[in-house]
């Protein structure tokens, strides 16, 4: 009978392998959140909001700025300011961390020529896949949780008036789902790829590319359809609306995408030839 300790050891090994990378990304993300929120009070006191108002209200720019969420009422509210300024940054950085980590889970074994050693140990491929994916999900949960905690503490420190806290935590769920979506994309790339070379550049390009597709989709109604292929499109940023809650259609799209891509990568991984 195969010992569960072996699966746990692989899980711990993967966590240890990526802990330094996670710490670097965490320092970057948390540092940028704190720095950006420190500008909120300055943004209000220095009259920057009043200077922006004529620009945002121009007939030509107003529809596009509204699509990007750049509205006076949002910028003057600390929660709206956080979503406009920090959410894109957090989603991009956690998305990059997630897809890069997922891509390297299996591709690095082949690139470093350690795949044959790992796969010939008394563990099934299902156990290997499960331990690695669980480690990846744990890292994603940690980095998102710390980012959310940092954001909440920053809001509490720099707020000039009270705000609704529940929408902040509800909105943060989208960040976790976005990270898992990019991780599932990374799993597919990692499972399908023959070698690990060039995959990091491709992964970053996917995150940045889908982000810009979402931006383009918000420019006008004629380009709105483009956003449907971007994970960023399914993040509901209308956080100031009354009774803000999760959009079930968007949430379901995230969950379905994650499950389908993860299942595909698992089935492909089971039949994949090991490269020496």
Image (cartoon, rainbow, N blue to C red):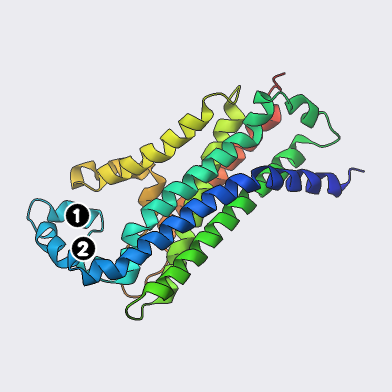
Closer to the camera in the image, 31 or 61:
31
Query: Please, what secondary structure does the residue beneath circle 2 have?
Result: loop
Q: How many marks?
A: 2
Q: Residue at x 32, y 80 (%)?
A: 161
Q: Position of residue 156 (x, y in %)?
A: 42, 75
Q: Residue at x 54, y 37 (%)?
A: 186
Given contact means CB atoms under 8 Å apart, are the residues at marks 2 and 1 in contact? yes
Mark closest to the chain's N terminus, 2 or 1 = 1
Q: Which residue is mark 1?
A: 65
The image quadrant of residue 104 is: top right
Q: Residue at x 78, y 31 (%)?
A: 118
Q: Residue furthest bottom?
A: 162
* Vertical side of 6 occupied by 267: above or below: above
**Observer able to see residue 109:** yes
For the C terminus, give its image quadrant: top right
The image quadrant of residue 125 is: top right
**Observer able to see residue 256:** no
Q: Residue at x 64, y 30 (%)?
A: 108
Disc 2 to disc 1, C-alpha distance: 7 Å
* Vertical side of 145 occupied by 152: above or below: below
Closer to the camera in the image, 19 or 41:
41
| Disc 2 crowd, CA 10 A, few/some/many (<14, 14-19, 20+) | some
Q: Position of residue 71 (x, y in %)?
A: 21, 63
Q: Residue furthest top?
A: 276
Q: Which residue is mark 2?
A: 71
Query: Please, what secondary structure does the residue beneath circle 1 have?
Result: helix
Q: Position of residue 180 (x, y in %)?
A: 53, 49
For the N terminus, give its image quadrant: top right
Q: Which mark is residue 56?
A: none
Instruction: Describe residue 272's horizontal placement relative to residue 40 as left or right.
Output: right
Instruction: Describe residue 9's horizontal placement relative to residue 258 as left or right.
Output: right
């Amino acid at each position: 009978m195969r010992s569960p300790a072996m699966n746990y050891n692989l899980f711990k090994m993967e966590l240890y392998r990526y802990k330094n990378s996670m710490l670097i990304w965490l320092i970057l993300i948390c540092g940028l959140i704190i720095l950006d929120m420190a500008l909120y009070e300055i943004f209000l006191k220095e009259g920057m909001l009043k200077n922006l108002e004529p620009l945002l209200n121009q007939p030509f720019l107003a529809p596009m700025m509204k699509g990007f969420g750049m509205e006076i009422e949002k910028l003057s509210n600390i929660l709206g300011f956080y979503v406009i300024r920090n959410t894109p940054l957090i989603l991009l950085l956690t998305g990059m961390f997630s897809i890069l980590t997922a891509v390297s889970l299996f591709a690095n074994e082949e690139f470093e020529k350690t795949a044959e050693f790992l796969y010939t140990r008394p563990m099934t491929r299902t156990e290997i896949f499960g331990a690695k994916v669980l480690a990846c999900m744990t890292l994603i949960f940690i980095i998102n949780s710390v980012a959310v905690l940092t954001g909440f503490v920053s809001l509490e420190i720099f707020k000039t008036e009270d705000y609704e806290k529940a929408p902040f935590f509800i909105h943060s769920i989208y960040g976790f789902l976005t990270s898992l979506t990019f991780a599932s994309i990374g799993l597919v790339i990692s499972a399908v790829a023959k070698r690990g070379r060039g995959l990091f550049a491709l992964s970053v390009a996917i995150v940045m590319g889908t982000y810009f597709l979402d931006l383009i989709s918000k420019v006008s109604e004629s380009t709105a359809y483009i956003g449907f292929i971007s994970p960023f499109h399914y993040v509901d940023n209308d956080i100031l609306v009354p009774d803000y809650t999760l959009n079930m259609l968007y949430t379901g799209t995230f969950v379905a995408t994650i499950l389908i891509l993860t299942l595909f990568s698992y089935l492909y991984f089971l039949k994949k030839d090991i490269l020496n």
